[in-house]
């Protein structure tokens, strides 16, 4: 008989502990930012939170579970729509903006039963079709007034500065909650199973991984996250137009941020979102040329740096800021 | 042992298995059974339907006709995932590691999901399995960085970490050097010693004959011989179909 090996599992490194501590410090600064920063900075930061949240959710789907969706705008839009309707039913607006995404999660759970039966490109396109179908369905609601859309007028009752800050905190709180949830999920055995499915779905099934259930968990979490981004967007824009909220451009942005930042890395979508945000700040005024430029950047990354910025760094460094895997350390006998 | 086999229902059984892909019939009324603790070899020329039979037994796809039973229970409609959790493990002819994960993470996923273990118990099983399959020193290596022998070991380690009753090995010796094959065959021998039921598809007969109690020969989707290994090898049908084709 073999003597049992004495071992330890390493889940934190000095770098990842430091990152966690710095993240907590950054969070503390961000929480009090509205107390000393200008309204413009607060508005811009809220936009950045929306981008980071969207990128992290798309990366969770495609980078960790192999679910490439071009229809995540379905949840961005339906979350905002649910929030609007909840306010119509008398729910306080900021509560509605939180509960709306949970409703989108239920829609995600129902859709997952059908959508996740499809694979690869079929799933990607089906998600786009679902997003369009939901947009059209929402336009039939008289309250939305078809193409015209509607507004979350209840927010006008708030003092503009208070409204700006509440929306900022909603964005920050939502982003923090989803980042922590994603991190914990990826570190759990569900996260490992999702990556196994991404790498080889049939082999994952053959070692006892419940492929459908794992995909559903990831899909629903990503639905809630994208919907949360949608309600934060609604709270800062106030107007709701189906063509904007359910627009495919949201998925294009997500794709851009994740490809540039690094698919399948925890850091990648955050890096990508910051870059996308800066590009938009600097070149956003050039409208059409700006969009063409984004396209060229995306093509350049796909061709020359397919692993993205974070992926490129990780291929050259052992240091990981966010450790989701497990390292085995054998203790000497 | 023979009396034991006769008295209880087989651990794994396929009855009247037909399998067609489109108009092409790969399996024709195949009957297969494995008793608890038995080690069975399956040989046959390429295209005989051996791997397809594994696919049907492990639940990768349903048979066109026929029944699969585990301990006498009909599992024909059961998914591969559920069958794995009930104790059927398989390795693939071409190893299918999870390339984005480390060797340890590959095996731990099997212990978590296939054996249904959590936390330290799962980790201990994964470590024990890695040690047994001589992969412990590569535990933190990305699976993508492994060579063929280690990929085959990982394929076996992952299957073992699901704690199977029966393991289906699909040409696990193919492509290895003589020394590597010897090491792997020794390992499979220890599994047999532990009482695990083994079904092994292999072209390399001398490795197979070191382990197996019974040999099944397939040709063109049918079982053409089934019995004591030396007798099966001497069967004129087998010699014509298999040995006559110039392999080994």
Image (cartoon, rainbow, N blue to C red):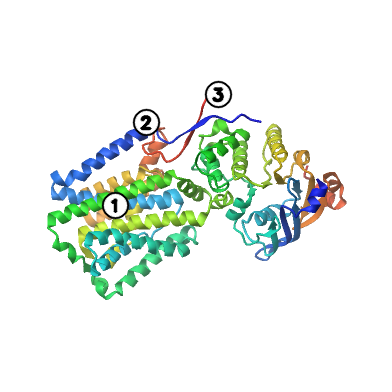
Q: Position of residue A68 (x, y in %)?
A: 43, 55
Q: In screen coordinates, is B132 left or right of B225? A: left
Chain letter of disc 2 in the image:
A
Chain letter of disc 3 in the image:
A
Quarter of the image with the N terminus of chain B in it: top right
Q: Is tag 1's residue or tag 2's residue first in the polypeptide sequence?
A: 2
Quarter of the image with the C terminus of chain B in it: top right
Q: Nearer the viewer, mark 3 or mark 1?
A: 3
Q: Is residue A27 above or below residue B17?
A: above
In the image shown, does B131 or B202 lie closer to the viewer?
A: B131
- Mark 1–mark 2 Cα distance, whole angstroms, equals 27 Å
Q: Secondary structure at mark 3?
A: loop
- Mark 3–mark 1 Cα distance, whole angstroms, equals 47 Å
Q: Tell me what residue is drawn at x 47 percent, y 49 percent.
A: A194
Q: Tell me what residue is drawn at x 27 percent, y 68 percent.
A: A85
Q: Position of residue A261 (x, y in %)?
A: 35, 45
Q: Secondary structure at mark 1?
A: helix
Q: Tell me what residue is drawn at x 38 percent, y 48 percent.
A: A182
Q: Which residue is mark 3?
A: A333
Q: Is tag 3's residue or tag 2's residue first in the polypeptide sequence?
A: 2
Q: Position of residue B202 (x, y in %)?
A: 72, 45
Q: Which residue is mark 1?
A: A174
């Amino acid at each position: 008989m073999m003597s049992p090996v004495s071992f330890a599992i390493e889940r934190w490194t000095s770098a990842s502990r430091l990152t966690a501590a710095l993240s907590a410090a950054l969070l503390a600064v961000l929480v009090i930012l509205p107390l000393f920063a200008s309204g413009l900075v607060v508005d811009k930061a809220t936009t950045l939170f929306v981008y980071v949240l969207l990128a992290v959710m798309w990366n969770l789907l495609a980078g960790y579970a192999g679910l490439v969706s071009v229809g995540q705008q379905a949840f961005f839009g339906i979350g905002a729509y649910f929030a609007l309707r909840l306010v119509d039913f008398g729910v306080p607006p900021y509560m509605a903006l939180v509960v709306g995404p949970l409703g989108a999660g239920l829609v995600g759970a129902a859709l997952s039963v059908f959508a996740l039966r499809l694979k690869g490109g079929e799933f990607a396109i089906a998600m786009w079709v679902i997003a369009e179908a939901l947009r059209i369905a929402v336009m039939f609601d008289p309250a939305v007034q078809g193409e015209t859309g509607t507004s979350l007028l209840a927010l006008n009752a708030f003092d503009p500065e208070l409204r700006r800050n509440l929306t900022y905190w909603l964005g920050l709180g939502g982003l923090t909650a989803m980042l922590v949830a994603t991190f914990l999920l990826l570190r759990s055995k569900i996260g490992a199973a999702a990556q196994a499915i991404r790498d080889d779905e049939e082999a994952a099934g053959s070692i006892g991984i419940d492929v459908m259930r794992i995909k559903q968990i990831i899909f629903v979490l990503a639905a809630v996250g994208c919907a949360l981004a949608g309600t934060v967007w609604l709270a800062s824009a106030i107007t709701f137009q189906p063509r904007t909220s359910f627009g495919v451009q949201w998925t294009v942005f997500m794709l851009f941020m994740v490809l540039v930042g690094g698919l399948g890395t925890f850091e990648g979508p955050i890096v990508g979102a910051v870059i996308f945000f800066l590009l938009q700040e600097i070149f956003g005024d050039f409208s059409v040329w700006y969009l063409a430029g984004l396209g060229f950047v995306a093509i350049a990354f796909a061709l020359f740096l397919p692993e993205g910025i974070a992926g490129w760094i990780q291929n050259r460094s052992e240091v990981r800021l966010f450790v989701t895997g497990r390292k085995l350390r054998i203790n000497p006998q | 042992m023979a009396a034991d086999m006769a008295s209880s229902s087989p651990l794994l059984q396929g009855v009247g298995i037909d399998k067609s892909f489109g108009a092409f019939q790969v399996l024709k009324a195949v009957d297969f059974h494995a008793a608890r603790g038995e080690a069975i070899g399956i040989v046959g020329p390429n295209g005989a339907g051996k791997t397809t039979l594994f696919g049907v037994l492990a639940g990768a796809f349903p048979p066109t006709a026929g029944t699969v039973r585990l301990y006498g229970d009909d599992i024909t409609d059961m998914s591969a995932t559920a069958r794995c959790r009930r104790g059927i493990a398989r390795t693939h002819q071409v190893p299918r590691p999870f390339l984005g994960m480390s060797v340890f993470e590959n095996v731990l996923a099997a212990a978590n999901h296939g054996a249904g273990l959590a936390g330290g118990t799962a980790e201990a099983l994964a470590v024990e399995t890695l040690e047994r399959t001589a992969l412990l020193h590569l535990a933190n290596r990305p699976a993508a960085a492994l060579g063929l022998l280690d990929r085959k070991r990982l394929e076996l380690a992952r299957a073992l970490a699901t704690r199977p009753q029966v393991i289906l090995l699909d040409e696990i010796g193919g492509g290895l050097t003589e020394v590597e094959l010897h090491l792997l065959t020794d390992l499979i021998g220890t599994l047999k010693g532990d009482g695990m039921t083994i079904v092994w598809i292999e072209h390399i007969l001398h490795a197979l004959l070191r382990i197996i109690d019974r040999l099944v020969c397939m040709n063109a989707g049918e079982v053409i011989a089934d019995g004591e290994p030396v007798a099966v090898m001497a069967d004129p049908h087998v010699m014509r179909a298999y040995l006559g084709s110039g392999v080994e």
